[in-house]
Image: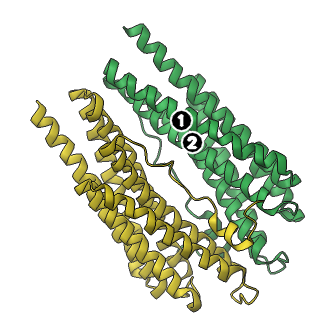
Chain colours: A green, B yellow
Amino acid sequence: MRDAYHEELDSISDGLVEMARLVGSAIGRATTAMLDSDLKLAENVIEADQKVDELQHDLEARAIALLARQQPVATDLRIVVTSLRMSADLERSGDLAQHVAKLARLRYPDRAVPSDLHATILEMGQLAQRLMAKAAEVIITKDVDLALQLEQDDDAMDLLHRTLFQHLMDDRWKHGIETAVDVTLLGRYYERFADHAVSVAKRVVYLVTGEHADELQTDVQPEIQAVSGAESA
Amino acid sequence: MRDAYHEELDSISDGLVEMARLVGSAIGRATTAMLDSDLKLAENVIEADQKVDELQHDLEARAIALLARQQPVATDLRIVVTSLRMSADLERSGDLAQHVAKLARLRYPDRAVPSDLHATILEMGQLAQRLMAKAAEVIITKDVDLALQLEQDDDAMDLLHRTLFQHLMDDRWKHGIETAVDVTLLGRYYERFADHAVSVAKRVVYLVTGEHADELQTDVQPEIQAVSGAESA
């Protein structure tokens, strides 16, 4: 019975890794679609999100079946419950990649991102993809040090996000309101995507060490704080 | 044993209702703080979110303890797992209310919202609060008809969101980029808050009827679609 149990648990873990790989690929391709104004690639990303949703449903059903059949307690129970949370993080990351792709599609054949922000958005997209690749690796290896690295990467994402907002707030901004709105939303999508990758890694840390990493720092509006300099407000 | 079980289950449900009430109040007060530029109220909302986080931790611990001790199966198991998801929705709603309050605090003594958008933001805030009040009622009554009403309310939220974006995209927009960024983020906070309230109600529907409501329509960027008119893009 215990063997069947661990096999089921492994298959849930495999499902999580597959989800992480799919959404990591999705954010990379969505970024390319947007920067290159590649309609076909954008539509490809939008459609591919269905696979992520299916994986999540499947994974949840298996987790619940496992709870019912095996009735795990203690650590084993925590692993299953935490898997459910990780799958929710990954599903939501997929939505965010899809949002980026939808924006690319919406603006086609124009580009949503003006050329002077191209490099920053490219970096945000690549960093998001790397964060998710590391999150997948953390699920596989349960490497706590690697998990903690993700927080540093997330700091880099915050910095990029600030750069984006500094461009927006610059008096020399010449791209009008529509582009400002697009860039604001894009910045938020990448930031939230990174938050979810960090969240996945932190949940692994919790499982391994039994200790909660610090309360997950989700989107604290650093961009606005930084730009206005009104930290104490 | 079964009595103890149902008592525990009731106490989890009570916890969810309390969370919904707290975050419903928070979004209402955050909106007031922003429209009135009331710093004290904003800080009050920001601090109060800790109580929501504590409730969530407490609720999760009790749900996991219940799984371990009572080992529920079938419907009972689904109730507990679904409660965990609802608590995550409610915790995230609290974060979003806090974001609104932080924006109010950041712009103090100025107002983040220009006067010609005051009425729209007030409506969004009130609607968000009503949605969460209904979600709480759905948790208590398990009233499926009421749960389905929330989707209509959410359509009204989408409409308000579109109105906001039409203002933003209007050539006569005179409030500059910083305000455009603030309003873009605010619109997104209210929209996501509403999505989470709808999600809570839909999870109750699933528990009662055993059927998933349609895949939850989370933020499909209707605002951008509507404004650009590029539905087919």
Left or right of residue B113, residue B78 in this image: left
Distance (Cα) linking label 1 and label 2: 7 Å
B36 sits left or right of A25 in the view: left
Q: Which mark is residue A185?
A: none
Looking at the rendered structure, the number of numbered marks drawn on it comes to 2
Q: Secondary structure at mark 2?
A: helix
Instruction: Say above or below: A88 vs A190.
Output: above
Task: Give the percent coordinates (x, y) of residue B219.
Answer: 58, 59
Name the residue: 64% across, 51% down. A96
- Judging from the image, mark 2 belongs to the subunit labelled A
- Residue A119: where, in percent of width, then height? 85, 55
Residue name at image x 82 percent, y 45 percent? A41
Of the 4 image quadrants, the one containing the C terminus of chain B is bottom right
A125 or B3: which is nearer to us? Answer: B3
Q: Which residue is mark 1?
A: A56
Q: State the residue at coordinates (76%, 60%).
A: B232
Q: Earlier in the sequence, mark 1 or mark 2?
A: 1
Q: Which mark is residue A91?
A: 2
Does the CB distance between marks 1 and 2 fall below 8 Å?
A: yes
- Give coordinates of residue A116: x percent, y percent: 88, 64
State the residue at coordinates (74%, 71%): B228
| Badge 1 element | helix
Whether residue B97 is visible to the viewer of this picture, yes or no, is no
Q: Amino acid at mark 1?
A: Gln
Crowdedness near tag 2: few (<14), some (14–19) or many (≥20) residues, C-alpha within 10 Å: many
Q: Where is B136 relative to A205, above or below?
A: below
In this rendering, would B46 be left or right of A140? left
| Kind of residue at badge 2 | Glu
The correct choice, above or below, for B19 with respect to B155 in the image is: above
